[in-house]
Image (spheres, grey):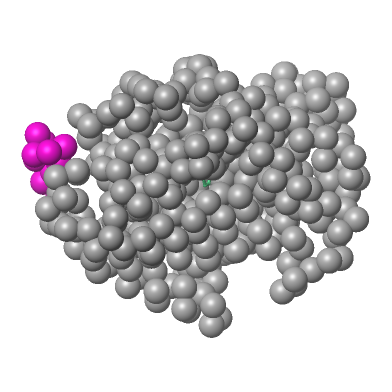
Amino acid sequence: MEANNNRGFTSNIGAILAAAGGAVGLGNVWRFPYMLGSNGGGAFLLVYVFFVLLIGIPLMMSEFIIGRRAQRNVVGAFRVLSPKHKGWMLVGIFGIVCAFLIYAFYSVVAGWTLNYIVLAAGGRLAGQTPDRVTQIFSDFTQGSFWPLCNQFLFLALTGLVVMMGVQKGIEKVSKILMPVLFILLLLMCVRSVTLGAGAKEGLSFLFKPDFSKITGSCILSALGQSFFSMSIGMGAMITYGSYIRKEDKLFNTSVWIAVCDSLVAILAGIVIFPAVFAFSMDPASGPELVYIVLPNVFNSMPGGVVFAVVFFLLLGIAALTSTISLLEILVAAAVEELHWTRRRASLVCSIVVFVIGAFCTLSFGPLKNMTIFDSTIFELFDKITASYLMPIGALMLTIFLGWFMPKAEVKDELSNGGAIKARAFELYYFVLRYVAPIALVIILITGIVG
Ligand code: PHE
């Protein structure tokens, strides 16, 4: 459709890669191991995979359906699809708020990758003891200047890419580099699982579920992680859905993205946990887990310095395709709804994110003691968005598509106007209408109550 032309993605593969690139990022390599480590290990993995299959894939399909049907950004999509009931636009605005909050804390960790590229390249991580590696992380994050600089740089880089509308170029580059990241992770897996005594323990921590660990908060965290990792529940996939061509198969695309996304997360787990136990670290260390464990893995690999540089570089690029997708949600909405230029939208949104995001960065240092509900600002943003806002957004989306939009329209969009069979439509529709919303309400309530 016409709207596609000024949006940067005109080809099938471009749009799909963009969506996949937006999904695979720090959520898989950084957040997944840290969440799993803090929430019951194997039990978490089991619940996570269950949610990806049961709710994640249908929800991603739903967002694609909304976006492609409307050919609009996250706010405009609801305006177009529900011209009489303007209230649904609030769901879009909810998504925008969510994107701001996620981008604010995500850019902190994305900035860390830049610092780690420099540390690794300068040989500053090589040959250090595990204690020293941990110290290096806290010295860096507790300072204010460098973490803020890195965050700023990352925001600027993302802003430039989105401003110039060159996502397509980036997606092409990542099409080559992401398989490299995947292979690198595989190599690191080999190193990690051959680390000796701890390695076995790490693998059973990851793969042997201890069912007593499946608590309300484990379930809520796993749900949140599946949403965060797949970028669903807040409009990212509505935005990208609007770029997907009418002849592409939404079901196949969603399954493909979900499989890649989960595979990268599980690989990251296989790298991290054997190393955690081999180096006697705490799997529940929190957000720093990956950054304090991986340098030790590199230190035990021949050619570790090179591996470390390449790895953090690729992780940075994976993060960049995700920050692009976050900013794109905001920019697409500002351009289409407020008629701003891309340039202005990118600039204003990035500045706002930096102002909010600076608090997240500083919450590792000067603002460490400023806690709300026992969490620092960073932890609060992280937890609130993934565990509450995204599931609530998802709930509203399922109600909109399952109960408000006519069934025939949903079927028409999913089957590409009847061109393809969409055999599992009834099953999908049942999940959309009943299973997903009921499950979401129950999980949210049990998670909140305890
Ligand atoms: N899914 C991305 C990741 O795993 C994070 C993200 C969330 C991106 C929501 C866009 C929207 O890194």
Of residues 331 and 55, which is closer to you in this image?
331
- Count the marks: how many? 0
Secondary structure mostly seen in magenta is: loop
Q: Does residue 98 sit above or below 183 in this rendering?
A: below
Of residues 139 and 349, which is closer to you in this image?
349
Q: Position of residue 329 (x, y in %)?
A: 50, 41
Q: Quadrant of the N terminus?
A: top left
Residue that sits furthest to the bottom in the current view: 449
Residue name at image x 76 percent, y 22 percent: 305
- Is 12 situated left or right of 38 in this image? left
Q: Position of residue 37 (x, y in %)?
A: 62, 57
Residue name at image x 61 percent, y 50 percent: 100
- Is 268 situated left or right of 172 in this image? right
Q: Quadrant of the C terminus?
A: bottom right
Magenta extent: 415-424
Residue name at image x 66 percent, y 34 percent: 347
Where, by quadrant of the figure, is residue 391 drawn?
bottom left
Q: Position of residue 287 (x, y in %)?
A: 70, 52
Residue name at image x 72 percent, y 18 percent: 306
Q: Position of residue 28 (x, y in %)?
A: 54, 43
Where, by quadrant of the figure, is residue 181 drawn?
top right
On whether residue 292 falls in the magenta region, the answer is: no
* Residue 167 visible from this viewpoint: yes
Q: Does residue 109 sit above or below 38 in this rendering?
A: above
Of residues 144 and 187, which is closer to you in this image?
144
Of residues 121 and 416, which is closer to you in this image?
416
- Is 107 situated left or right of 431 in this image? right
* Residue 272 visible from this viewpoint: no
